Amino acid sequence: MKKKIVTILGILLIISLCFITLYDFSKKENNLTKVKVAEVAHSIFYAPQYAAISEGYFEEVGLDIELTLASGADKVMASVLSEDVDIGFSGSEATIYVYNGGEEDYLKTFAQLTQKDGSFLVSREKIENFTLDDLKGKYVIGGRLGGMPEMTFEWALKEHGINPKTDLTIDTSIAFAAMGGAFIGGIGDFVTLFELNVTKKKRLSSLFNKTNILYYLNHKIY
């Protein structure tokens, strides 16, 4: 009899603890304001954002961040305009395009997370002592026309005396999310990619056994 009573009390104690835990969790969740954010790319380049989410910095100020991926600044802006998300995280050029397009309810850039472009320039063949002059006469998958990575890339070329319109071919017809796959499929001599796209796919990683990865940051090639 005594054993049964102890067992019943133990079960009741466990149930009580479960209810208390669920109540506290629900209370905590209800005190947070949910903010839906669409990011342009999932990249190590945006590590400060992920660290803030995972370490609970947003929760400390009462925010519950729901992060989704919308590959390409144009898709990010579409998500914001359709009110599927509250905030779009992408290059600032997207807000300018929306404003110039005559939208009455235009978007505004209000915060900055990064200061430089985070693209990698990947070559299909290994090149010793690479310089930007090696791009002359080559075919490069550059990204979406008018996108920040593409504009940064062309700016870097011009800074080194290379005409992006005549000295090489830059393909801007391939969607941001499809650039890695297009390169794997045999298109182009070079491609500009964001990490993790550079290494997350096994096929792309195996391709790197015979490629040269060149990182440009702050418009300088390393």
Image: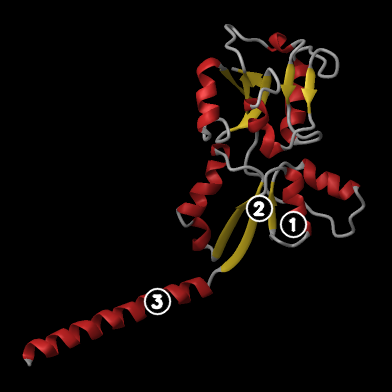
Among the two numbered marks 1 and 2 on one chain, the one whose residue lies closer to the N terminus = 2
The crowding category of the residue bearing disc 2, from other C-alpha atoms within 10 Å (few below 14, some 14 to 19, many at least 20), is many
Q: Quadrant of the N terminus?
A: bottom left
Residue 79 lies, in percent from the top left, at: 73, 55
Looking at the rendered structure, the kind of residue marked 1 is Val
Please report contact status of discs 1 and 2: CB closer than 8 Å, yes or no: yes
Q: Residue at x 50, y 62 (%)?
A: 59
Q: Residue at x 78, y 26 (%)?
A: 171
Which residue is the site of mark 2? 38
Badge 3 marks a residue whose secondary structure is: helix
In the picture provided, is 41 more to the left or to the right than 167? Answer: left
Which residue is the site of mark 3? 22
Give me the disc on residue 205.
Answer: none
- The vertical placement of 173 against 95, above or below, is above
Looking at the rendered structure, the kind of residue marked 2 is Ala
Residue 80 lies, in percent from the top left, at: 74, 57
Picture quadrant of residue 119: top right
Q: Quadrant of the C terminus?
A: top right
- The vertical placement of 112 against 85, above or below, is above
Q: Residue at x 75, y 30 (%)?
A: 150
Which residue is the site of mark 1? 80
Alpha-carbon distance for marks 2 and 3?
29 Å
Toward the viewer: 208 or 41? 208
Looking at the rendered structure, the kind of residue marked 3 is Leu
Please report contact status of discs 2 and 3: CB closer than 8 Å, yes or no: no
